[in-house]
Image (cartoon, rainbow, N blue to C red):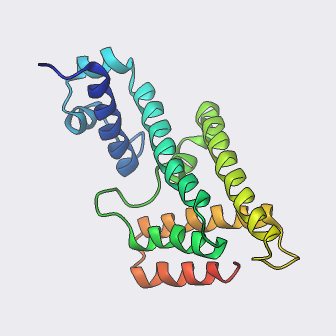
Amino acid sequence: MARPRKFEEERAVEAAMRAFWDAGYEATSTQDLCEATGLGRSSIYNTFASKRELYDRALRHYMTRKNAGLFELLERDLPIREKVRVLLWQIVDGDDDEPTGCFVVNSMVELAPHDPEVAACLQRDQERRLEALRAAIGLAHHRGELGQDTDPATLAHFLVATVSGMRVVARGGADRSALEAIATTALTAF
């Protein structure tokens, strides 16, 4: 019995996500996508219409997956410092099954400066993450976990910048001790 087309599309989007995440949009050729997904050129274009549509789907898939993990962490019944520690140490520990760095950050650097559609998509994604972090930090502030002079919005921006920066330096080859030092320093804000 053949697998449903939806399953094949999801598998192809996941594989394409990894290819784009690893090499970027421009450096990922259609042949690279064929090799990554196991699909032929005609199947890719019949299913996704273009490399760009496949990229957009892969980017949205990445954002949905990563945000789900973040939102789940932020909803857990833990002190904010522990939530932030878990978030930062996910980067320190890395995941051997994923490309190094961050697909969102890579897209911000490669495409957002000259592609308004990608820029708008990334901006909406960042706003969602910032709001979720601001809300979690605000709740912790209300509970007395943070100093009275703490500004939840500022800390949320700081945390997004720290996470993005850690992913960039990890992609650039920073070792575990460098990532631990950044995470430990950032944790002092909480």
Number of disc labels: 0
- In this orientation, which residue lies closer to the viewer: 58 or 25? 58
- What is the quadrant of residue 175 in the picture? bottom left
Residue reaching furthest top? Answer: 46
Residue reaching furthest right? Answer: 149
Q: Which part of the image, by quadrant, shows the C terminus?
A: bottom right
Check the image and report above or below for 121 versus 53.
below
Q: Position of residue 144 (x, y in %)?
A: 80, 76
- In this orientation, which residue lies closer to the viewer: 92 or 75? 75
Question: Is 79 placed left or right of 53 in the picture?
Answer: right
Question: Is 2 placed left or right of 119 in the picture?
Answer: left
Question: Is 37 placed left or right of 131 in the picture?
Answer: left
Question: Is 40 placed left or right of 142 in the picture?
Answer: left
Q: Position of residue 106 (x, y in %)?
A: 50, 51
Q: Which part of the image, by quadrant, shows the N terminus?
A: top left
Check the image and report above or below for 69 versus 94.
above
Residue at 39 percent across and 21 percent down: it is 50
Q: Position of residue 150 (x, y in %)?
A: 83, 73
Check the image and report above or below for 166 versus 12.
below
Q: Position of residue 83 (x, y in %)?
A: 58, 69
Residue at 32 percent across and 44 percent down: it is 19
Residue at 46 percent across and 49 percent down: it is 103
Residue at 43 percent across and 85 percent down: it is 177
Residue reaching furthest front? Answer: 77
